Amino acid sequence: MAIWIYGVLFALRLSSVLGAVKSGSGIASNTISELTTRGPHFDQTASKNVTALLGKTAYLNCRVKNLANRTMSLQVSWVRHRDVHLLTVGRYTYTSDQRFRAIHQPHSEDWTLQIKYPQHRDSGIYECQVSSTPHLSHFIHLTVIEPDTEIVGAPELFIDRGSTINLTCVVRHSPEPPAYIFWNHNDAIITYSSSRGGVSVATERGETSRSVLLIQKARPTDSGTYQCNPSNAKSANVTVHVLNGEQPEAMQHGGNQRMGPSLGALAFICYVLLVYC
Ligand SMILES: *[C@@H]1O[C@H](CO)[C@@H](O)[C@H](O)[C@H]1NC(C)=O
Ligand SMILES: *[C@@H]1O[C@H](CO)[C@@H](O)[C@H](O)[C@H]1NC(C)=O
Ligand SMILES: *[C@@H]1O[C@H](CO)[C@@H](O)[C@H](O)[C@H]1NC(C)=O
Ligand SMILES: *[C@@H]1O[C@H](CO)[C@@H](O)[C@H](O)[C@H]1NC(C)=O
């Protein structure tokens, strides 16, 4: 009997939680000022949107002020908006998806949703809901991002012998700026003090980080695969071809060149020869 009543109460609570989710905009029309002075309300500054890194555990926090008082005992639930899926109720994790977990310390105002191994499809809106009458909702946007590494001009660069190889590696969306960015040439780490000389690297770290590898007076032996290895993001590579042999005079000053202009110049010379000889 007791179990049955408890079951009914629980079901009622769930249906009221879900009902409030579906009622949508009705929630917003609460008289906020009244609730913030007396009843439960959200601490917006401690319940912010979250940007999480792919695969790295994310925490969505919901801080509720004035939740418990002598007359009322209210539940805080987390609901995924995409499919109106009830994830947690109080300290109970309701979903069968093991990646989700409710975290709440006794006497704390924080009701945290933990998401392990977040994937791109987890991006979206999550609703923190208080089972008061009327229901209170706070929406948190989760954005799951992936660090991205790119070498400008990849996958292939054509460079004239004698000019400067200028490789720029750009790292975006890393959780924090990479501690270091290594460069490899044909799988060997590039040392700036090598006998080759004329090799320098400038790294600029920030929200977007850049590492610029400069190799002066390119030689055919500088050809091959260059790989940029940031400490906390995936690597990127570029294949460099140092063009050996005779180049038209103008090309010597060109720096990094795609095959296009070089072929164009050859075609032009052939055309001139055909017309005038
Ligand atoms: C307890 O919370 C309820 C629901 O928010 C509110 O209506 C009531 O005024 C509160 N009581 C006290 C004593 O704060
Ligand atoms: C959360 O993100 C959404 C969508 O980007 C935005 O509309 C909303 O203002 C953001 N909320 C906060 C508190 O920054
Ligand atoms: C190297 O290339 C970047 C653009 O990719 C440019 O901003 C920079 O000035 C170049 N550096 C040199 C020394 O040519
Ligand atoms: C170079 O990068 C491409 C993707 O841009 C990848 O498919 C390839 O396996 C990489 N090669 C090496 C040697 O890392």
Image (cartoon, rainbow, N blue to C red):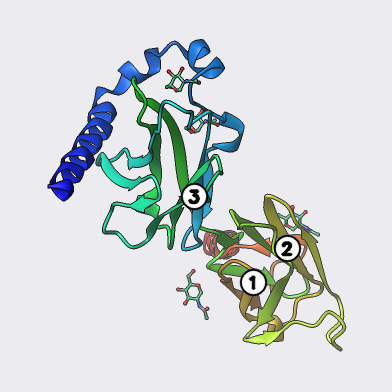
Q: Residue at x 42, y 25 (%)?
A: 71
Residue wearing tag 1: 228
Kind of element beneath mark 2: strand
Say if 205 sits above or below 82 in the image. Answer: below
Residue wearing tag 2: 211
What percent of the width, then of the height, locates residue 11?
18, 40
Classed neighbour count for the residue bearing mark 1: other residues with Cα under 10 Å, few (<14), some (14–19), many (≥20)? many
Res. 246 image quadrant: bottom right
Residue wearing tag 3: 104
Viewer-nearest residue: 220 or 268? 220
* Total count of labels: 3
Res. 189 image quadrant: bottom right
What percent of the width, then of the height, locates residue 233?
59, 66
Q: Residue at x 64, y 62 (%)?
A: 257
Q: Is residue 65 left or right of residue 210?
A: left
What percent of the width, then of the height, locates residue 227?
62, 75
Residue 78: mark in rendering: none
Kind of element beneath mark 1: strand
What percent of the width, then of the height, locates residue 231?
66, 71
How far apart in space, not on screen, are marks 1 and 2 (Cα)?
A: 8 Å
Q: Is residue 172 left or right of residue 18?
A: right
Classed neighbour count for the residue bearing mark 3: other residues with Cα under 10 Å, few (<14), some (14–19), many (≥20)? some
Kind of element beneath mark 3: loop
Viewer-nearest residue: 171 or 261? 171
